Structures are given as C-alpha cells and as structure tokens.
Image (spheres, rainbow, N blue to C red):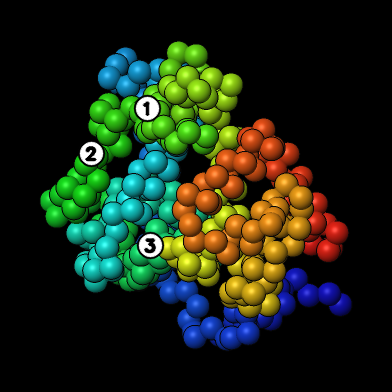
Amino acid sequence: MLSNRPPTYSFPKTFAVGSNRSIPPLVTTEQLKNHLGLLHVFAKLRAQIDALQISDYSGIPYLPEDKEKRWCWFVAQAVERFSIWCDILTHTDSTRPAVDILPPADVLMVWHAYMLNPRWYAEDCSRLRELQRLKDFMTVLSHSLSSGLSEILSSEPTNARMNTWVERTGRAFDPLQDAEVNQSRTVLCPKCRLPNNIPYMNAHGTGFFQSNFKVQCANVSCANLTITRSTLCARRLVQDLARSVSDPGGENAACLPGTLRNLQTAEDVANGQSIKQLIFRAPVFSNKPHAPIYEIKDVVQKEKWVLAVLDKTGFDLKRLGRCVGLKMKAQGGNL
C-alpha cells in the first residue's frame, strides 16, 4: 500500500565543489539572510527607477518615459560607475570595514550580476590587471555576508563610506545626483585614437547608452568611419590579439577572453597561447616576414599592425570573427 508520507531524506553535510569537498555548512542562515537583504536593496532600486517622475529630474536630459528603457539607462550608468570604482580600488581597501568602504547599491548590483557568471568573472579577475584588486576586495563582501551586510545597506551610509566614494571617483554617491552632473564620456576613436566626448543620451537615440549608438570622429581624416559599439569591439579584439606576455598583466593578460580557463583546470596559459597561435595562421593576421605581433614589444609597431588588420577587415566585428574562427574550426575548436 502506498504511503502518503514524503520519502525520508537526510540533507548532505558536504558538497562536491570541483575536486574538493565543501567545509560544512556550505551556506549559513546568516549568509542567506544577508543575501536576501542585498537582493531586496536591488529590488527597491528597480522600484525607485520605475516610479520616477520625469518632471522631477529635468536635470537629466532625454530620460526615457518608458519604464523598461529607463531601467536600461540606469543599469548602463551603474556599469559606468562600476568600471570607475574598479579603477580606484587599492590593495588596502580589502582590510577596511564594509560599513566604511562598500560602494553604492547600484555599483554592488552590477558586481553581483557579474559574479552570476562565475567562470567569466574568475577568468577576468585573473586576466585583467584592473580587476585583480576587485578579487582581493571580495573578502570584504564575503565577511559582510556573514555579518551585517543587510543592516549596512538598509541604513544611511556612513560619512566615511560616502566620502571615500566621492573623493576617489569625483562622482556623487547617489546615482541620480550623479546623472544630473555627469552626462557624457570620452571615447577614443578606434582608428586615430582622438578622444571624442560623447553624450550618454541624445534626442536622436545615438548616445553612448542608447541602442543605436553611433558618432562620427571629430578628426576629418576618419570621416569614412562611424564609431559604434561594433567598431570599438573590433578594436579591442585586435588589441587583445596583439598583446604579448611582456605587456602589463603578463602571460594571463596575453590570452584572449574565454581562453585562459578550461573545463579541467582553473588556469591554462598554455592552452590560451596555443589558441592564439592557431588564430595567427589566418592570412589576415600575418606579420610576415616579421615575428608574430604578440611576440613583439615595440608599441609603435604593434599599433601599425592593429590598424592594418582593422583596415583589412573594414573595422567589421563580424568579419573579424569569421577570420578568428577560420583556423579554430579547422582544428576542431571554437571561441
């Protein structure tokens, strides 16, 4: 006869994490409470932005009426603030109390979202020099998750916390106050490297935060090139290809994004280097009769090579992707 009782189940005391076993308990009740408190702060942020009265923020031009578009604008600004914060972190910040050093809630939201892809996050923290201090700072968040994070975020920020942010970033602690002052950013032309000041939002929908972002470089010699996210990404990809182990960041930074880690090991520099060597067999990336560009230290020579590749491919990211994948597929691999 079938029983209506649920089956007997004993909750495991440890869990497999890679090749190791977790130290019990894997997650404490206090950590769960603080994490839920963190998510509640993010939900309050969303509700605040949804409820904004546009007329109350006339100092923020072209603020979208549509709630979804307004949230996208807010997240884009939060990403910008997160990037600035990563650049100003110091090695000693990880030793300070969370109540005096944590960034604003919108920046924490971006950081939290970043960590939801742990593989990419871990690789970027190892590969990108500007994120290595963020990796150290993780101890502050970890400790606060075990003790006091929810209370810190639900209370008014301390003067020390706000002053640290304002003095180092030059931006307001409150993201909406920040948006009333900082409304543009400087973008280097992917061709001539001239700094261009680009508004975040404009009436044409072509601002840096908008879906149809595009702008002409102020340099007349670049009149045939429109700066878009695609052309900026194309420049970044070719620069990454040219990066050598002697450049800042060393051998980890010389690997292309997504190639430093594999399914078996945390970091596999040899694998990343072999992938780059495969890619350089494609004719468009050849530097013959000279050595491969990633083995050359001369900055001027590297820049000439980067521009030559971009000119060959028309600054077209999709075309570059096909060139990168050409030799990869021949070897049974992919990026």
- What percent of the width, then of the height, locates residue 229? 56, 34
Q: Is residue 230 left or right of residue 47?
A: right
Tag 1 secondary structure? strand
Amino acid, disc 3: Leu
Name the residue carrying label 3.
134
- What percent of the width, then of the height, locates residue 150? 32, 58
Tag 3 secondary structure? helix
- What percent of the width, then of the height, locates residue 101? 23, 59
> In the rendered structure, which disc, 1 or 2, sits on the residue that comes first in sequence?
2
Amino acid, disc 1: Asn
Marks 3 and 2: in contact by CB < 8 Å? no
> In the rendered structure, which disc, 1 or 3, sits on the residue that comes first in sequence?
3
Q: Nearer the viewer, residue 150 or 254?
A: 254
Name the residue carrying label 1.
197
Q: Which residue is at a point 44% across and 23% down the rendered structure image?
A: 219
Name the residue carrying label 2.
172
Q: Which residue is at a point 32% across and 22% down the rendered structure image?
A: 60
Q: Nearer the viewer, residue 73 or 240?
A: 240
> For the residues marked 1 and 2, what is the alpha-carbon distance in whole angstroms?
20 Å
Determine if residue 156 is in view: no
Indicate which disc residue 147 carries: none
Q: Is residue 80 left or right of residue 160?
A: right
- Relative height, residue 143 to residue 64 (above, below): below
Q: In the figure, residue 313 lies in which quadrant?
A: top right
Q: Mark 2 against mark 3, which lies toward the viewer?
A: 3
Q: Quadrant of the C terminus?
A: bottom right
Count the numbered circles shown: 3
